Amino acid sequence: MTKLQLNKNSGLLSPDFIFGVATSSFQIEGDRNGRATCIWDTFCRQNDRIKDASNGDSACEHVKYWRQDVEIIASLGVDAYRLSIAWGRVMNADGSVNQAGLNFYSRLIDALLERGIKTHVTLYHWDLPQFEEDQGGWLNRDTAYRFADYAEVVVGALGNKVESYSTINEPFCSAYLSYEAGIHAPGPYPVSHDSGNRRKNGRQAAHHLLLAHALALPRMRKLAPASEHGIVLNFSPCHAASDSMADRTAAETAHAYHNLWYLQPLLQGRYPELLKQLSDNEQPDIEDGDLELMQQPLDFLGVNYYTRTTFRETPDGWFKDVPAQGDNLTTMGWEVYPQGLTEILTQLKKTYPTLPPVYITENGVAYDDVVCHNKINDDNRIDFFQQHLNAVEDCINAGIDIKGYYIWSLMDNFEWAEGYTQRFGIVHIDFDSGQRRLKESAKAWQQFLHSRPMIKVPAESC
Protein backbone atom coordinates (compact mmCIF):
# COMPACT_ATOMS: atom_id res chain seq x y z
CA MET A 1 0.00 0.00 0.00
CA THR A 2 1.23 3.47 -0.88
CA LYS A 3 1.84 5.59 2.21
CA LEU A 4 1.16 9.23 3.01
CA GLN A 5 4.09 11.08 4.51
CA LEU A 6 5.31 14.55 5.38
CA ASN A 7 8.62 16.07 6.32
CA LYS A 8 9.09 15.75 10.09
CA ASN A 9 9.23 19.54 10.35
CA SER A 10 6.09 20.10 8.28
CA GLY A 11 3.68 22.75 9.47
CA LEU A 12 0.90 20.23 8.85
CA LEU A 13 2.21 18.25 11.82
CA SER A 14 1.67 21.11 14.24
CA PRO A 15 -0.58 20.04 17.16
CA ASP A 16 -3.01 22.78 16.15
CA PHE A 17 -3.38 21.66 12.53
CA ILE A 18 -6.73 19.92 11.92
CA PHE A 19 -7.17 16.87 9.70
CA GLY A 20 -10.75 15.93 8.94
CA VAL A 21 -13.20 14.25 6.60
CA ALA A 22 -16.20 15.94 4.99
CA THR A 23 -19.68 15.12 3.69
CA SER A 24 -22.90 16.96 2.90
CA SER A 25 -26.45 16.20 3.97
CA PHE A 26 -28.30 15.55 0.71
CA GLN A 27 -25.45 13.48 -0.66
CA ILE A 28 -25.42 10.91 2.15
CA GLU A 29 -28.40 11.11 4.50
CA GLY A 30 -31.28 9.36 2.76
CA ASP A 31 -34.39 9.24 5.00
CA ARG A 32 -36.45 11.11 2.44
CA ASN A 33 -39.52 11.00 4.70
CA GLY A 34 -37.73 12.70 7.56
CA ARG A 35 -37.35 16.06 5.86
CA ALA A 36 -39.15 18.48 3.60
CA THR A 37 -38.75 18.20 -0.16
CA CYS A 38 -35.76 20.17 -1.42
CA ILE A 39 -34.85 21.52 -4.84
CA TRP A 40 -32.68 18.49 -5.57
CA ASP A 41 -35.59 16.11 -4.98
CA THR A 42 -37.56 18.07 -7.57
CA PHE A 43 -34.61 18.31 -9.96
CA CYS A 44 -33.94 14.57 -9.78
CA ARG A 45 -37.46 13.83 -10.93
CA GLN A 46 -37.09 15.87 -14.10
CA ASN A 47 -36.03 14.07 -17.26
CA ASP A 48 -32.37 14.11 -18.29
CA ARG A 49 -31.12 16.06 -15.29
CA ILE A 50 -29.17 13.32 -13.48
CA LYS A 51 -26.70 11.23 -15.48
CA ASP A 52 -27.93 7.86 -14.16
CA ALA A 53 -31.53 9.02 -13.52
CA SER A 54 -31.03 8.46 -9.79
CA ASN A 55 -32.00 10.52 -6.76
CA GLY A 56 -31.06 11.13 -3.14
CA ASP A 57 -33.97 9.29 -1.52
CA SER A 58 -31.65 6.67 0.00
CA ALA A 59 -28.12 7.80 -0.84
CA CYS A 60 -25.80 6.29 1.80
CA GLU A 61 -28.62 5.94 4.35
CA HIS A 62 -26.52 7.87 6.84
CA VAL A 63 -29.56 8.64 9.00
CA LYS A 64 -29.95 4.88 9.40
CA TYR A 65 -26.27 4.00 9.76
CA TRP A 66 -24.96 7.12 11.49
CA ARG A 67 -23.64 5.25 14.52
CA GLN A 68 -21.61 2.96 12.28
CA ASP A 69 -20.37 5.98 10.34
CA VAL A 70 -19.25 7.69 13.55
CA GLU A 71 -17.22 4.60 14.44
CA ILE A 72 -15.60 4.65 11.00
CA ILE A 73 -14.73 8.33 11.40
CA ALA A 74 -13.22 7.63 14.81
CA SER A 75 -11.21 4.68 13.44
CA LEU A 76 -9.54 6.93 10.89
CA GLY A 77 -7.88 9.03 13.58
CA VAL A 78 -9.10 12.35 12.21
CA ASP A 79 -9.43 15.42 14.40
CA ALA A 80 -12.70 16.68 12.93
CA TYR A 81 -15.75 15.89 10.83
CA ARG A 82 -17.28 18.46 8.50
CA LEU A 83 -20.98 17.88 7.94
CA SER A 84 -23.88 19.94 6.69
CA ILE A 85 -27.35 20.46 8.09
CA ALA A 86 -30.36 19.88 5.83
CA TRP A 87 -32.47 23.03 6.11
CA GLY A 88 -35.61 21.01 5.34
CA ARG A 89 -34.83 18.47 8.04
CA VAL A 90 -34.81 21.21 10.68
CA MET A 91 -37.44 23.71 9.49
CA ASN A 92 -41.04 23.24 8.37
CA ALA A 93 -42.72 25.32 5.68
CA ASP A 94 -44.69 27.30 8.27
CA GLY A 95 -41.51 28.38 10.05
CA SER A 96 -41.86 25.93 12.93
CA VAL A 97 -39.00 23.66 13.98
CA ASN A 98 -38.86 19.96 13.13
CA GLN A 99 -37.53 18.89 16.51
CA ALA A 100 -36.89 15.31 15.43
CA GLY A 101 -34.56 16.53 12.69
CA LEU A 102 -32.75 18.90 15.01
CA ASN A 103 -32.35 16.11 17.57
CA PHE A 104 -30.70 13.90 14.95
CA TYR A 105 -27.90 16.39 14.42
CA SER A 106 -27.54 17.01 18.15
CA ARG A 107 -27.12 13.29 18.85
CA LEU A 108 -24.65 12.96 16.00
CA ILE A 109 -22.48 15.79 17.26
CA ASP A 110 -22.63 14.50 20.84
CA ALA A 111 -21.44 11.07 19.66
CA LEU A 112 -18.53 12.68 17.83
CA LEU A 113 -17.60 14.75 20.85
CA GLU A 114 -17.60 11.64 23.03
CA ARG A 115 -14.88 10.28 20.75
CA GLY A 116 -12.85 13.48 20.82
CA ILE A 117 -13.84 14.50 17.29
CA LYS A 118 -14.54 18.17 16.60
CA THR A 119 -17.37 19.16 14.28
CA HIS A 120 -17.42 21.76 11.52
CA VAL A 121 -21.05 22.44 10.64
CA THR A 122 -22.09 23.90 7.29
CA LEU A 123 -25.56 25.40 7.36
CA TYR A 124 -26.26 25.41 3.62
CA HIS A 125 -24.86 22.91 1.13
CA TRP A 126 -27.17 23.50 -1.84
CA ASP A 127 -30.32 21.71 -0.59
CA LEU A 128 -32.77 24.61 -0.48
CA PRO A 129 -36.23 23.49 0.71
CA GLN A 130 -38.72 23.43 -2.14
CA PHE A 131 -41.07 25.57 -0.06
CA GLU A 132 -38.44 28.34 -0.27
CA GLU A 133 -37.91 27.80 -3.99
CA ASP A 134 -41.65 28.08 -4.53
CA GLN A 135 -41.37 31.65 -3.21
CA GLY A 136 -38.54 32.46 -5.66
CA GLY A 137 -35.60 30.73 -4.02
CA TRP A 138 -32.33 32.61 -4.08
CA LEU A 139 -33.80 35.09 -6.57
CA ASN A 140 -36.05 36.28 -3.75
CA ARG A 141 -34.38 38.61 -1.26
CA ASP A 142 -36.62 37.29 1.51
CA THR A 143 -34.84 33.91 1.31
CA ALA A 144 -31.73 35.52 2.79
CA TYR A 145 -33.73 36.61 5.84
CA ARG A 146 -35.32 33.19 6.25
CA PHE A 147 -31.88 31.63 6.06
CA ALA A 148 -30.80 33.83 8.95
CA ASP A 149 -33.82 32.63 10.94
CA TYR A 150 -32.93 29.02 10.16
CA ALA A 151 -29.28 29.63 11.15
CA GLU A 152 -30.46 31.06 14.46
CA VAL A 153 -32.47 27.92 15.19
CA VAL A 154 -29.56 25.58 14.44
CA VAL A 155 -26.84 27.53 16.22
CA GLY A 156 -29.19 28.23 19.11
CA ALA A 157 -29.64 24.48 19.55
CA LEU A 158 -26.06 23.31 18.95
CA GLY A 159 -24.19 26.30 20.36
CA ASN A 160 -20.56 26.11 21.40
CA LYS A 161 -20.31 22.33 21.16
CA VAL A 162 -19.70 22.88 17.44
CA GLU A 163 -16.08 23.87 16.85
CA SER A 164 -16.79 25.96 13.76
CA TYR A 165 -19.75 26.99 11.62
CA SER A 166 -19.86 27.85 7.93
CA THR A 167 -22.85 29.74 6.64
CA ILE A 168 -22.81 28.84 2.94
CA ASN A 169 -20.90 26.22 0.95
CA GLU A 170 -19.74 27.31 -2.49
CA PRO A 171 -22.16 30.12 -3.37
CA PHE A 172 -20.62 30.02 -6.85
CA CYS A 173 -22.29 26.65 -7.44
CA SER A 174 -25.64 27.67 -5.96
CA ALA A 175 -25.65 30.84 -8.06
CA TYR A 176 -23.81 30.13 -11.30
CA LEU A 177 -24.33 26.39 -11.83
CA SER A 178 -27.92 26.54 -10.59
CA TYR A 179 -29.57 29.82 -11.51
CA GLU A 180 -27.31 30.89 -14.38
CA ALA A 181 -26.04 27.80 -16.20
CA GLY A 182 -29.02 25.68 -15.11
CA ILE A 183 -27.08 22.42 -14.76
CA HIS A 184 -27.75 22.15 -11.02
CA ALA A 185 -31.01 22.43 -9.09
CA PRO A 186 -33.33 24.21 -9.43
CA GLY A 187 -32.24 24.15 -13.06
CA PRO A 188 -33.06 26.45 -15.97
CA TYR A 189 -35.41 29.20 -14.89
CA PRO A 190 -38.46 30.01 -17.02
CA VAL A 191 -36.96 33.11 -18.59
CA SER A 192 -36.20 33.90 -22.21
CA HIS A 193 -33.10 32.44 -23.83
CA ASP A 194 -31.40 35.82 -23.71
CA SER A 195 -28.02 35.34 -21.96
CA GLY A 196 -28.48 38.61 -20.11
CA ASN A 197 -31.47 37.24 -18.22
CA ARG A 198 -29.58 34.12 -17.22
CA ARG A 199 -26.64 36.24 -16.13
CA LYS A 200 -28.95 38.46 -14.14
CA ASN A 201 -30.35 35.39 -12.37
CA GLY A 202 -26.87 34.16 -11.49
CA ARG A 203 -25.70 37.53 -10.18
CA GLN A 204 -28.91 38.07 -8.20
CA ALA A 205 -28.74 34.63 -6.60
CA ALA A 206 -25.09 35.25 -5.72
CA HIS A 207 -25.95 38.55 -4.09
CA HIS A 208 -28.70 37.03 -1.99
CA LEU A 209 -26.49 34.12 -0.92
CA LEU A 210 -23.81 36.53 0.30
CA LEU A 211 -26.50 38.64 1.94
CA ALA A 212 -27.79 35.54 3.74
CA HIS A 213 -24.30 34.93 5.06
CA ALA A 214 -24.03 38.51 6.27
CA LEU A 215 -27.43 38.50 7.96
CA ALA A 216 -26.84 35.21 9.74
CA LEU A 217 -23.29 35.74 11.00
CA PRO A 218 -24.00 38.23 13.82
CA ARG A 219 -26.78 36.04 15.19
CA MET A 220 -24.51 33.00 15.06
CA ARG A 221 -21.70 34.77 16.92
CA LYS A 222 -24.09 35.80 19.66
CA LEU A 223 -25.42 32.27 20.12
CA ALA A 224 -22.06 30.46 19.89
CA PRO A 225 -19.39 32.98 20.94
CA ALA A 226 -16.77 30.28 21.55
CA SER A 227 -17.13 28.79 18.07
CA GLU A 228 -15.41 29.95 14.89
CA HIS A 229 -17.61 31.42 12.16
CA GLY A 230 -16.93 31.72 8.45
CA ILE A 231 -17.93 30.74 4.93
CA VAL A 232 -16.73 28.20 2.34
CA LEU A 233 -15.80 29.31 -1.19
CA ASN A 234 -14.49 27.21 -4.04
CA PHE A 235 -11.58 28.49 -6.09
CA SER A 236 -9.93 27.43 -9.29
CA PRO A 237 -6.98 29.17 -10.94
CA CYS A 238 -8.06 30.52 -14.30
CA HIS A 239 -5.60 29.90 -17.12
CA ALA A 240 -5.66 31.18 -20.67
CA ALA A 241 -6.08 28.69 -23.50
CA SER A 242 -3.32 30.45 -25.44
CA ASP A 243 -0.85 33.31 -25.14
CA SER A 244 -3.13 35.60 -27.12
CA MET A 245 -4.22 38.82 -25.46
CA ALA A 246 -7.86 37.84 -26.06
CA ASP A 247 -7.54 34.55 -24.17
CA ARG A 248 -5.51 36.12 -21.36
CA THR A 249 -8.23 38.73 -20.95
CA ALA A 250 -10.86 35.97 -20.97
CA ALA A 251 -9.03 34.17 -18.15
CA GLU A 252 -8.79 37.38 -16.11
CA THR A 253 -12.51 38.02 -16.62
CA ALA A 254 -13.32 34.47 -15.55
CA HIS A 255 -11.18 34.89 -12.43
CA ALA A 256 -13.15 38.00 -11.47
CA TYR A 257 -16.50 36.42 -12.32
CA HIS A 258 -15.99 33.00 -10.75
CA ASN A 259 -13.51 33.65 -7.91
CA LEU A 260 -13.32 37.27 -6.84
CA TRP A 261 -17.07 37.90 -7.18
CA TYR A 262 -17.66 35.89 -4.01
CA LEU A 263 -14.60 36.89 -1.99
CA GLN A 264 -14.18 40.59 -2.63
CA PRO A 265 -17.54 41.69 -1.15
CA LEU A 266 -16.71 39.77 2.03
CA LEU A 267 -13.27 41.34 2.44
CA GLN A 268 -13.69 44.78 0.87
CA GLY A 269 -17.44 45.43 0.75
CA ARG A 270 -17.56 45.77 -3.02
CA TYR A 271 -17.85 43.65 -6.14
CA PRO A 272 -15.04 43.44 -8.72
CA GLU A 273 -14.82 46.20 -11.34
CA LEU A 274 -16.30 43.67 -13.77
CA LEU A 275 -19.70 44.60 -12.34
CA LYS A 276 -19.54 47.88 -14.28
CA GLN A 277 -18.98 45.97 -17.54
CA LEU A 278 -22.28 44.14 -17.20
CA SER A 279 -25.30 45.69 -18.86
CA ASP A 280 -28.06 47.14 -16.71
CA ASN A 281 -30.27 44.08 -17.24
CA GLU A 282 -27.42 41.77 -16.13
CA GLN A 283 -26.54 43.49 -12.86
CA PRO A 284 -28.03 42.37 -9.55
CA ASP A 285 -30.38 44.57 -7.56
CA ILE A 286 -28.35 45.84 -4.60
CA GLU A 287 -29.93 47.78 -1.76
CA ASP A 288 -28.15 50.46 0.25
CA GLY A 289 -26.07 48.95 3.01
CA ASP A 290 -25.90 45.43 1.52
CA LEU A 291 -22.22 45.53 0.62
CA GLU A 292 -21.18 47.13 3.88
CA LEU A 293 -23.09 44.41 5.74
CA MET A 294 -21.29 41.70 3.79
CA GLN A 295 -17.95 42.89 5.13
CA GLN A 296 -18.40 40.97 8.38
CA PRO A 297 -15.30 39.79 10.28
CA LEU A 298 -14.44 36.20 9.36
CA ASP A 299 -12.73 33.83 11.78
CA PHE A 300 -11.77 31.67 8.82
CA LEU A 301 -12.25 31.17 5.11
CA GLY A 302 -13.07 27.65 3.97
CA VAL A 303 -11.49 26.83 0.61
CA ASN A 304 -12.61 23.97 -1.62
CA TYR A 305 -10.12 23.06 -4.31
CA TYR A 306 -10.18 20.41 -7.03
CA THR A 307 -8.50 21.58 -10.25
CA ARG A 308 -7.66 24.50 -12.52
CA THR A 309 -9.83 25.80 -15.36
CA THR A 310 -8.74 26.98 -18.80
CA PHE A 311 -10.60 29.68 -20.75
CA ARG A 312 -10.75 31.11 -24.23
CA GLU A 313 -12.44 34.26 -25.50
CA THR A 314 -15.84 33.95 -27.14
CA PRO A 315 -16.92 35.92 -30.21
CA ASP A 316 -18.92 38.32 -28.01
CA GLY A 317 -15.86 39.14 -25.90
CA TRP A 318 -16.81 36.97 -22.93
CA PHE A 319 -15.16 33.70 -21.84
CA LYS A 320 -15.77 29.96 -22.21
CA ASP A 321 -14.05 27.11 -20.42
CA VAL A 322 -12.00 24.62 -22.42
CA PRO A 323 -12.34 20.95 -21.34
CA ALA A 324 -9.19 19.43 -19.90
CA GLN A 325 -7.27 16.95 -22.03
CA GLY A 326 -4.51 14.41 -21.53
CA ASP A 327 -3.91 11.29 -19.46
CA ASN A 328 -3.91 12.94 -16.03
CA LEU A 329 -7.69 13.23 -15.73
CA THR A 330 -10.16 12.01 -13.13
CA THR A 331 -13.43 10.28 -13.97
CA MET A 332 -15.03 13.74 -13.62
CA GLY A 333 -12.83 14.83 -16.53
CA TRP A 334 -10.86 17.13 -14.24
CA GLU A 335 -7.10 17.55 -14.51
CA VAL A 336 -5.05 16.60 -11.46
CA TYR A 337 -3.28 19.90 -10.85
CA PRO A 338 -2.08 20.17 -7.23
CA GLN A 339 0.11 23.21 -7.84
CA GLY A 340 -3.07 25.12 -8.62
CA LEU A 341 -3.93 25.19 -4.92
CA THR A 342 -0.70 26.97 -4.12
CA GLU A 343 -1.14 29.22 -7.13
CA ILE A 344 -4.65 30.41 -6.31
CA LEU A 345 -4.05 30.92 -2.59
CA THR A 346 -0.83 32.86 -3.06
CA GLN A 347 -2.59 34.95 -5.71
CA LEU A 348 -5.49 35.69 -3.36
CA LYS A 349 -3.15 36.51 -0.48
CA LYS A 350 -1.30 38.98 -2.70
CA THR A 351 -4.58 40.57 -3.82
CA TYR A 352 -6.09 40.60 -0.32
CA PRO A 353 -3.38 40.90 2.36
CA THR A 354 -6.12 40.61 5.03
CA LEU A 355 -7.08 37.11 3.83
CA PRO A 356 -8.46 35.29 6.90
CA PRO A 357 -6.98 32.03 8.20
CA VAL A 358 -7.83 29.21 5.80
CA TYR A 359 -9.20 25.70 6.16
CA ILE A 360 -8.99 23.50 3.08
CA THR A 361 -12.56 22.32 3.59
CA GLU A 362 -12.72 20.04 0.55
CA ASN A 363 -10.06 18.32 -1.52
CA GLY A 364 -10.49 14.97 -3.17
CA VAL A 365 -10.79 13.00 -6.38
CA ALA A 366 -13.12 10.61 -8.21
CA TYR A 367 -11.73 7.47 -9.81
CA ASP A 368 -13.16 4.15 -10.98
CA ASP A 369 -12.88 2.02 -7.85
CA VAL A 370 -13.06 -1.75 -8.25
CA VAL A 371 -13.87 -4.12 -5.40
CA CYS A 372 -11.61 -7.16 -5.76
CA HIS A 373 -11.60 -9.81 -3.02
CA ASN A 374 -13.28 -7.31 -0.69
CA LYS A 375 -10.45 -4.81 -1.28
CA ILE A 376 -10.41 -1.47 -3.12
CA ASN A 377 -6.91 -0.62 -4.26
CA ASP A 378 -6.90 3.13 -5.01
CA ASP A 379 -3.25 4.06 -4.94
CA ASN A 380 -4.01 6.76 -7.51
CA ARG A 381 -6.18 8.48 -4.89
CA ILE A 382 -3.41 8.20 -2.29
CA ASP A 383 -1.01 9.80 -4.78
CA PHE A 384 -3.55 12.61 -5.30
CA PHE A 385 -3.71 13.30 -1.56
CA GLN A 386 0.07 13.22 -1.22
CA GLN A 387 0.50 15.75 -4.00
CA HIS A 388 -2.07 18.07 -2.47
CA LEU A 389 -0.64 17.79 1.03
CA ASN A 390 2.63 18.90 -0.51
CA ALA A 391 0.79 21.83 -2.11
CA VAL A 392 -0.66 22.80 1.28
CA GLU A 393 2.87 22.67 2.67
CA ASP A 394 4.01 25.01 -0.11
CA CYS A 395 1.19 27.41 0.82
CA ILE A 396 2.23 27.47 4.45
CA ASN A 397 5.85 28.06 3.45
CA ALA A 398 4.62 30.96 1.29
CA GLY A 399 3.15 32.62 4.38
CA ILE A 400 -0.51 31.58 4.09
CA ASP A 401 -2.17 30.74 7.40
CA ILE A 402 -3.73 27.32 6.79
CA LYS A 403 -5.31 25.74 9.85
CA GLY A 404 -6.63 22.46 8.54
CA TYR A 405 -7.32 20.05 5.70
CA TYR A 406 -10.55 18.10 5.10
CA ILE A 407 -10.73 15.07 2.82
CA TRP A 408 -13.57 14.99 0.29
CA SER A 409 -15.16 12.72 0.88
CA LEU A 410 -15.59 10.40 3.82
CA MET A 411 -17.74 8.09 1.70
CA ASP A 412 -18.95 7.58 -1.84
CA ASN A 413 -22.20 9.45 -2.27
CA PHE A 414 -24.76 11.06 -4.56
CA GLU A 415 -22.63 13.31 -6.72
CA TRP A 416 -25.30 15.83 -7.76
CA ALA A 417 -25.93 15.88 -11.52
CA GLU A 418 -23.54 12.93 -11.90
CA GLY A 419 -25.74 10.74 -9.70
CA TYR A 420 -23.91 7.70 -8.37
CA THR A 421 -21.50 7.47 -11.31
CA GLN A 422 -18.64 9.19 -9.46
CA ARG A 423 -16.87 7.88 -6.36
CA PHE A 424 -15.03 10.48 -4.28
CA GLY A 425 -14.99 8.56 -1.00
CA ILE A 426 -12.18 6.97 0.94
CA VAL A 427 -14.89 4.62 2.21
CA HIS A 428 -16.61 2.53 -0.45
CA ILE A 429 -20.40 2.34 -0.32
CA ASP A 430 -22.42 -0.50 -1.79
CA PHE A 431 -25.55 1.46 -2.66
CA ASP A 432 -27.67 -1.71 -2.78
CA SER A 433 -26.71 -3.25 0.56
CA GLY A 434 -25.39 -0.17 2.37
CA GLN A 435 -22.14 -2.01 3.18
CA ARG A 436 -19.17 0.20 4.04
CA ARG A 437 -15.63 -0.83 3.10
CA LEU A 438 -12.43 1.06 3.81
CA LYS A 439 -10.52 1.69 0.60
CA GLU A 440 -6.74 1.50 0.67
CA SER A 441 -6.74 5.31 0.74
CA ALA A 442 -8.68 5.22 4.03
CA LYS A 443 -6.14 2.77 5.44
CA ALA A 444 -3.32 5.05 4.30
CA TRP A 445 -4.95 7.96 6.13
CA GLN A 446 -5.40 5.74 9.21
CA GLN A 447 -1.75 4.84 9.22
CA PHE A 448 -0.65 8.42 8.69
CA LEU A 449 -2.97 10.00 11.24
CA HIS A 450 -2.38 7.46 13.99
CA SER A 451 1.40 7.76 13.63
CA ARG A 452 1.71 11.53 13.33
CA PRO A 453 4.99 12.70 14.90
CA MET A 454 3.45 15.86 16.33
CA ILE A 455 5.80 18.83 16.38
CA LYS A 456 6.48 19.97 19.89
CA VAL A 457 6.25 23.73 20.38
CA PRO A 458 9.12 24.93 22.62
CA ALA A 459 7.98 26.40 25.92
CA GLU A 460 8.51 30.10 26.27
CA SER A 461 11.57 30.92 28.30
CA CYS A 462 10.99 32.53 31.66
Image: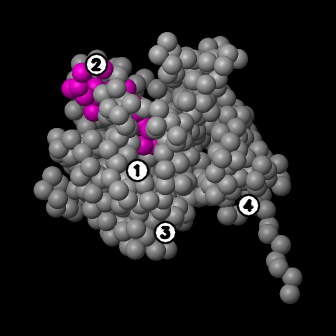
Q: Secondary structure at mark 1?
A: helix
Q: Position of residue 383 (x, y in %)?
A: 69, 32
Which residue was labeled with disc 4? Answer: 14
From the viewer's perspective, is 241 left or right of 23?
right
Quarter location, residue 254:
top right
Of residues 90 and 269, the one nearer the viewer is: 269
The amino acid pointed to by label 1 is Leu
Separation of marks 2 and 3 at Cα, in angstroms: 45 Å
Binning the other alpha carbons within 10 Å of mark 4 as few (below 14), some (14 to 19) or many (20 upward) gives some
Of residues 162 and 428, the one nearer the viewer is: 162
User: Which mark is nearer the camera, 1 or 2?
Assistant: 2
- Tell me, yes or no, whether the highlighted magenta stretch contains residue 175: yes
Q: Residue at x 21, y 46 (%)?
A: 132
Which residue was labeled with disc 3? Answer: 227
Of residues 206 and 163, the one nearer the viewer is: 206
Which residue was labeled with disc 1? Answer: 210
Q: Position of residue 158 (x, y in %)?
A: 37, 67
User: Which mark is nearer the camera, 2 or 3?
Assistant: 2
